[in-house]
Image (tube, grey):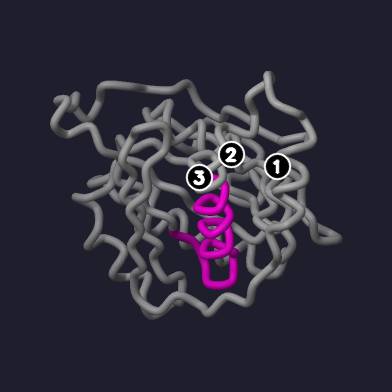
Amino acid sequence: MNVQYKVLHAETFGCAGSKTEEDDVKFIVFCGLDGAGKTTLLRRIRTHIQEIEDQGDPNDDTKDPMQHEVRAAKVEEMDTVPTIGVEAYQLQLRGLPLNILDLSGQEAFRVHWKRYDGQTDLIIFVVDASNRSRLEEARKTLNDFILNNQAICNKPLLIVGNKNDLEGAITVEQLVEGLFGKDAEKQVINRSYHVLSTSALRGDGVRFLMEWFLRK
């Protein structure tokens, strides 16, 4: 599995203060345009975490390398209903509690994203990499509601180019240029900032996404 991953800016830690052990829980916000695949991606993450809980880490080298592929093949694609408002999930990954918010990407709801600024530790902005016609809308939304929001300027940000399994999906490099232009590294100052290519359907990139939760 070839996971495309690019660091766009040097990571900055400690800007928002440190947590105590009692506060050792991650609050993660998934946002992005409607139809980007946020809910499907979260379903894949939840399924993967459940597999780890039930059968152990499928990436453990001491296990049969085919086990994970067999289990992944059994994960059937399910119809998803567009999120209206907010959906909340409480998960646990390797002992770390995760509180995840799936924010509706419908245009009328985006103005309400800021309500969750105070609860945010990590931000996942999901883009449909197969839909070039909405890339400009994604760029504007990212700038208006995330990059120009001073309340979350120190929060680690991961931009996910989802649906890389579909024909015509753009690469990470094309996604970066579409969202930030050719001088991407100059667009965001003083924040942790990464881009990842995923397929919620096939599971591409989900392992790294979960590791990112833990590292941040």
Mark 3: secondary structure: helix
> In the rendered structure, does residue 43 fall within the stretch colored magenta?
yes
Check residue 172 in the rendering and tell me which mark sits there, or answer none.
1
Q: Position of residue 185 (x, y in %)?
A: 55, 30
Q: Which residues are magenta?
A: 31-49
Crowd around label 2: few <14 · some 14–19 · many ≥20 (10 Å): many
Q: Residue furthest right?
A: 167
Check residue 195 in the rendering and tell me which mark sits there, or answer none.
2
Report the side of 212 relative to 147 (left or right).
right
> In the rendered structure, does residue 178 fall within the stretch colored magenta?
no
Check residue 49 in the rendering and tell me which mark sits there, or answer none.
3
Q: Position of residue 104 (x, y in %)?
A: 42, 71
Check residue 108 in the rendering and tell me which mark sits there, or answer none.
none
Name the chief secondary structure element in magenta.
helix
Look at the picture and state if 154 lies above or below 37.
above
Please name whichever residue, 107 or 119, is drawn nearer the observer in this view of the structure.
119
* Amino acid type, label 2: Val
**Disc with the residue nearer the chain's start (3 vs 1):** 3
Q: Quadrant of the N terminus?
A: top right
Crowd around label 1: few <14 · some 14–19 · many ≥20 (10 Å): many
